Amino acid sequence: MAILSNTEFGILRLTISRAQKRNSINAEMFDTMTEALSRAASDDAVRVVLLQGGEQIFSAGADLEEMRSQPEVLDRAMTNFFAALRAFPKPVVAQVMGPCVGDALSMLLYCDLVYASERALFSLPCVALGQTTRFGSEPITAAEALEMRIITGIADDESLDNLVASKVARLAVLPPGAVRAMKALLTGPRNKALEVAAEEEEAVWRRQAGSAEAAEALAAFLEGRKPAFRPE
């Protein structure tokens, strides 16, 4: 399975595990995470969710091959996942090691705590692919992510596991009702702002994603050549 799921000591661990594809996320993987969040929302055994990738890369983002072959299927799965993540009532913690690209970076906007290794890299190559951002995201550097508190903290590789483990363990033993109530208070204004931004971005993205520019950029990337853009 490309998404590994394990619940222990009140912690639901969702691990992106598709190293041969640089942990790119296809529709089936988005659906798996959506279903896991849906079950966890009403499961008293789950107090906190930990979202992580591999040791070498967090994720290269959405699967570009599927984006080209089955765009409607991937888009539906992504939209459902981000809606579920935004509405999830319990704490979500992300652990990032290595590159975090595209829609994988957008995930971090909806996580409550994000801890990254010193070698983590963040990028949104949407313009290079002839597209625009979605789901309330914008291009940022790692330093900007920390300054904007999209990333909660940074640690070296040797310390990151222990740091994240201590944070999720603490969340798992706090009073669950109080934690959910506090999250609702803290994320309410954020989610409203993101919803407004996401609606505008969605309209622009759909127009640009269907353009000849986007088709050429994606084809060139998958075929390993330089794109040739022409005015439409």
Image (spheres, rainbow, N blue to C red):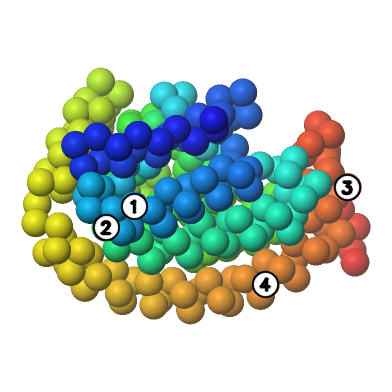
The Cα–Cα distance between marks 4 and 3, rounded to whole angstroms, is 22 Å
Q: Which amino acid does label 4 sit on?
A: Val
Mark 4 or 3: in front is: 4
The residue drawn where x is 29% and y is 63% is 89
Mark 3 or mark 2, which has the lower sequence index? 2
Measuring from the top left, give residue 31's x and y in whole percent.
55, 50
Q: Name the residue under label 3.
A: 228
| Dot 1 crowding, Cα within 10 Å, few <14, some 14–19, many 20+ | many
Q: Which amino acid does label 3 sit on?
A: Ala
Mark 1 or mark 4, which has the lower sequence index? 1
Q: Which of 2/142 is in front? A: 2
Mark 2 or mark 4, which has the lower sequence index? 2
Mark 1 or mark 2, which has the lower sequence index? 1
Q: Mark 1 points at which residue?
A: 40
Measuring from the top left, give residue 116's x and y in whole percent.
33, 37
User: Circle 2 sits in a helix, a strand or a loop, which is it?
Assistant: loop
| Dot 2 crowding, Cα within 10 Å, few <14, some 14–19, many 20+ | many
User: Circle 3 sits in a helix, a strand or a loop, which is it?
Assistant: loop
* Quarter that holds the C terminus: bottom right
Q: Mark 4 points at which residue?
A: 204
Q: Which amino acid does label 2 sit on?
A: Lys
Mark 4 or mark 3, which has the lower sequence index? 4
